[in-house]
Amino acid sequence: MDAVAGALADPIRRSILLMLRNGGATAGWIAEQFAVSRPAVSRHLRVLREAKLVKDVASGREREYRLTLDSLEELEAFLSALRRPGAASAAAWEQRFDALETEVARVRKRRRAGQTKTRRTA
């Protein structure tokens, strides 16, 4: 999670991620979008790659970078817990209430079915 948070801390790296959300791009094209040197952009791409936020694929002489978001899951879980302390327990209670509601519906259905049978036989 620390590598992901560190990678996201830089505005150029965040811009690169936003560029890649609609599809892959070559390192050359990405470098052209910034007023910093190509080696600087290359270092930013390396940080993103090491944090597993992007992957690179050889495409001839170029490297094409694509967004990968799996490594964000741990950070998202942390941020979610930070925003709503006790959210995990609230979710557990919500799940219990849903189960209770389902059981109440089953009992009502059984009772209605039993009353219908009793009326027919009477």
Image (cartoon, rainbow, N blue to C red):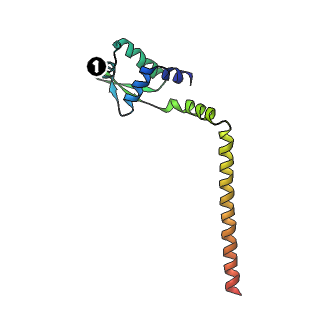
Residue at image position (70%, 76%) is: 114
Counting the numbered discs, the total is 1
Residue at image position (67%, 35%) is: 85
**Residue corresponding to mark 1:** 61
The amino acid beneath tag 1 is Arg
Badge 1 element: loop
Residue 111 x, y percent position in the rendering: 70, 72
Tell which residue pokes out farthest to the left in this image.
Answer: 60
Residue at image position (30%, 22%) is: 29
Q: Is residue 24 above or below residue 31?
A: below
Residue 60 x, y percent position in the rendering: 28, 22
Q: Is residue 36 above or below residue 13?
A: above
Position of 3 compared to 17: left or right?
right
Please state which of residues 116 and 17 is positioned toward the viewer in this rendering.
Answer: 17
Tell which residue pokes out farthest to the bottom in this image.
Answer: 122
Which image quarter is the C terminus in? bottom right
Residue 88 x, y percent position in the rendering: 66, 40
Residue at image position (71%, 82%) is: 118
